[in-house]
Amino acid sequence: MKENASLLPKKFISKHVMASSYTATTTAGEVAKDLAHQIKGKVILTTGVSPKTLGATFVETIATAEPALLILAGRDTTKLKHMKGVMNTTQPQVQVRLLQLDLGSLAAVRKSATEVKSWNDVPHIDILVSSAGIMATDFWLSPDGFEGQLATNHLGHFLFANLIMDKILASKSPRVVNISSDGHRLSPIRWVFKGGETYNKWQAYGQSKTANILMAVSLAEKLGSKQGLLSFSLHPGTIMTTSLGSHIDWTVDYETLRATDRAMGNAEGWADFKVKSAEQGAATYVYAAFEPSLKAHNGAYLEDSKIADPWMKTVKPWATSSIEAERLWKLSEELVGQEFDY
C-alpha cells in the first residue's frame, strides 16, 4: 500500500523528501526481496550483532540475498559465535567472519581496526552499518574519561569508521549507515562537559543520537563528491523486543522520559509509544544500506524506509546542521586524539 509523503500543501513539503512506497509496517524481508540484486555479492560489516538486536535481524535478513561476506562485530565473543552458528545453520552458503569490537574503549577500537586492515583476503568493505549502541544508562565514564553513552554510541564508531575508511573507499559503491533514533530530539550536542553534575540519562542518549546523524552529514560532505561515499543515518522505530532497553525499569524511567520530552516541548511527552516489530525496525536498515536512489540524497536521515519528512516526522534542526556537524567533527577528532582531514 502506498503512503502519501505528506498531507501538507506542496509548498510546505521539503524538497529533499523522496517518494517511497514503503510504510511503517514494511518488513526487512520485504525490502531485502526488492533490493536482492543490490545485496548480492556485497561485503557488509555490521556492529552490534548479538541475539535480540536489530543488527542481528538485519544480517539474518540480508543473508537470504547472497552477500559475499558478512562481518559481525560486537563486544561479546560468545554472543558473536552464537550468531555465527545461527547463520551457518540457516544460511550455510554465506561466508561469516567475526570481529571483537568494544566501542567503549578507544584502545580496543584501534586494535579492532588494525585487525580489519590486516585482512588481506578482504580488500574492501562495501557497507559499514554502525548499529551497536546503549540507551539511557546511569552516569559512567569510559576508560578514556568520556561520558559513557557519547563514548560508546558516537566516539567509538567515529574512530572505527575513520580508521577503516581506506577499506570502505576501496569499494566501487562505498556506504556508511549510522543507526540513530528519533531520540535525538532529547538533546543537541552539549558543548560544555562538567563531569556529570547535570547528567540526565535521556538527554545523554539524545546527544549521542544527534551525534550519529551529524557524523553521517559530515561523511557525506567530506567524502561524497570526492570519493563517492554515501552516508546515511536512520531511526528504526520503537522496538520493545530487543535487548537495548533490557536494563530499564519502565515503571520509573518512562515517566522520566516523558518529563524530559515535556520540558523540551516535544509532542512525544504527551503521546504513547508507536511500537514496531524487530522485522519492521530493520526494514530501514536494509533500505539505507542498499537503496540505489538514495545516491541523490547523500547525508539524509531516514525513517520508515524513506527520507524523514521534517514537516511530518521528528527531525530536529540541530541534528542536520552542517555547522553543527563540522563542530562535532572537530571536537570528536580532539577527543579521540587523531585528525581525519579528508
Image (spheres, helix red, strand yellow):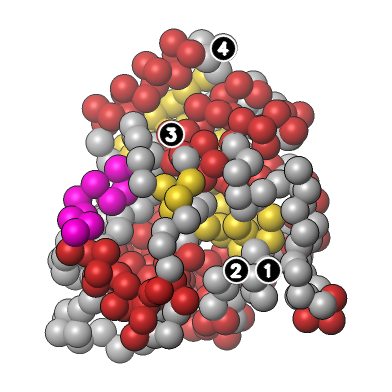
Which residue occupies 76% across, 75% down? 8
Taking the spot 40% from the left edge, 18% from the top edge, the residue there is: 86
Q: Quadrant of the C terminus?
A: bottom right
The main secondary structure of the magenta stretch is loop
Residue 246 located within the stretch drawn in magenta: yes
* Amino acid found under the numbered disc labelled 3: Ala
Tell me the residue that label 2 is attached to.
Answer: 313
* Residue located beneath label 4 in the image: 93
Q: Which mark is residue 56?
A: 3
Instruction: Say which mark, if any, is on residue 309.
Output: 1
Viewer can see residue 120: no
Tags 2 and 4 touching, CB below 8 Å: no
Q: Earlier in the sequence, mark 3 or mark 1?
A: 3
Residue depicted at 22% across the width and 57% down the height: 250
From mark 2 to mark 4, how far is it between C-alphas?
A: 40 Å
- Quadrant location of residue 124? top right
Rendered location of residue 152, percent (x, y): 31, 58
Query: In whole angstroms, how far apart are the C-alphas of marks 3 and 1?
Result: 28 Å
